[in-house]
Amino acid sequence: MENLSLFSPPGSQTDSSIALLWDKTDKKALGYTVIINGKEVAITKATDYTAEGLMPNTEYSISVRAELEEGGMLNSDIISVSTKAKPAVIDVTTYGAVGDGMTSCTRAIQQSIDSCPVGGMVYIPAGVFVSSALFLKSNMILYLDKGAKLLGSDNIADYPLRNYRFEGLETKCYSSLINTSFDSAERLFDITIAGDGVIDANGVSLRQQELKENKGKPGRAVCIRNADNVYMKDITVRQSPAWCVHTIYCHGVSLNNVKIHTRYDENGDIYDGIVNGDGFDPDSTSDVYVFNSLIASQDDCIAIKSGRNEEGRRVGIPSENIRITNCRFQSGLGVAVGSEMSGSVRNVLVQDCTFTDVFSIGSVKAPRGRGGVVENILFDCVTMTNRDPHYHDCEWFRGGINIDQFYSHKEFDVDAKEEFGEGTPVFCNITFRNAYVDTDGGNAIYLAGLPESPLENIRLENIKAKGKYGFKASNVRGLVLENVEVESAEDEPYMFKNVTDSSGNML
């Protein structure tokens, strides 16, 4: 009999809370009951729950029960999870930080970080604290209280050039507002960024200056590199010079109730001049959990990456085991894989998410030259309604459901075959199911494989899609369509070329 798989993601425990995730049952569930130490504490329709108000340094027995529409129940195993010890707290004001929105607090905050004991918390109270680049270390919490804002300095001299990976290549970049230390040769671990406050990278000002000086690529708001067990909880991150939250070569990353704004702030005011404004980029990063979060981005809401071309293949660190559930996306280009995916991407789940004024639910993209394999990708129970005229069908984004191996090319011939080699990307085993697409821009569904490397085993199940254009597909081998309805405003609903079904018959 099916059993619910319940777990707490690595690093997602604080001194007073435990984050929980479980797999969605294939049977229709009326709701899920969370049971802690034998007591029913919550009923939810989501597949995540965060237990709050717990005692520090305490072990809890936890299980989940699904109430089924057909009658009966499904239960998880009982798991034991412990909260962390209560942290020692270092208030940045004790080192001289002043939250007046004018005084530079970099030295005071960095001193707080450097002196933070193992498992300790650097605490930023209410106020606006101006800072340049900060560097976190292992086994610490950066906590921004309600009403606190960490505001990036607008002086690019405050952001030293360092080597980061950006757009798939190791290159000089301006430091981000929040960074991990570059001084340690060892991997970092157990880093938490939490609280109801705001991290504002001042990207409108910084981006223009960084592009003008042109000594490196623009920085990010938060860039965590070579770290295990990274946890972001309740925080708002906004106005980055480029990508907003970027994890590189990390393992065990969780975003819980995180709000990311790269196109406009919480009040709807547009950030002028922000380009490359991805929300979250897990880059050669594994075991990633994004849940109960909101992203309003200028570019890809989430972009899963693993390096670019020969360098990415040589490094060879995939992004894998990524779960994105119960999230809201309110502008931008949806959840993307690529285009820098040369180290491969596998085992991605996007489930129970809504997309409002977003151009794509999912975009799997890579041109020739990348190499690498994208496989085992599932979008399930996702809805998209797009009325935003800001984006339109072009070489960068082509459909509400979009798999594109001619990405970035304005002109191309789907019949022009090239030799298969190490730079040829392979896309296989990609499924969209239980999806609703209604978009005023672009194709409802767009699938384009290379003639030398057709898309393989693409499944569309229970799909209702409406677009300016219809369903275009070329060079697809093993396309499965079950209960798919497509409406087009301006052309034929279905336009297929070199497409076969799972039995090899031409469609």
Image (spheres, grey):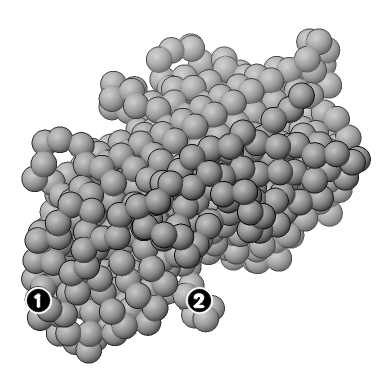
- At x 22%, y 85%, the residue is 99
State whether residue 192 is above or below residue 4: below
Q: Is residue 280 left or right of residue 356?
A: left
Among all residues in the image, which is located at the extreme right?
Answer: 70
Q: Which mark is residue 501?
A: none
**Would residue 360 be visible to someone looking at this image?**
no
Which badge, 2 or 1, is on the more N-terminal residue? 1
Type of the residue with mark 1: Tyr
State whether residue 292 is above or below residue 201: above
- At x 85%, y 30%, the residue is 482
Q: Residues within 10 Å of mark 2 (few under 14, many from 20)?
A: few
- At x 81%, y 50%, the residue is 30
- At x 42%, y 68%, the residue is 236
Q: CA distance from mark 2 to mark 1?
A: 31 Å
x and y percent of residue 267 in the render? 52, 81
| Residue 340 or residue 48, whichever sits in front | 48
The N terminus sits in image quarter? top right
**Which residue has dot 2 on it?**
266
**Which residue has dot 1 on it?**
95
- Which circle, 2 or 1, is nearer the viewer? 1
How many labels sit on residues? 2
Which secondary structure lies at badge 2?
Answer: loop
Q: Is residue 156 left or right of residue 397?
A: left
x and y percent of residue 207 in the render? 29, 66
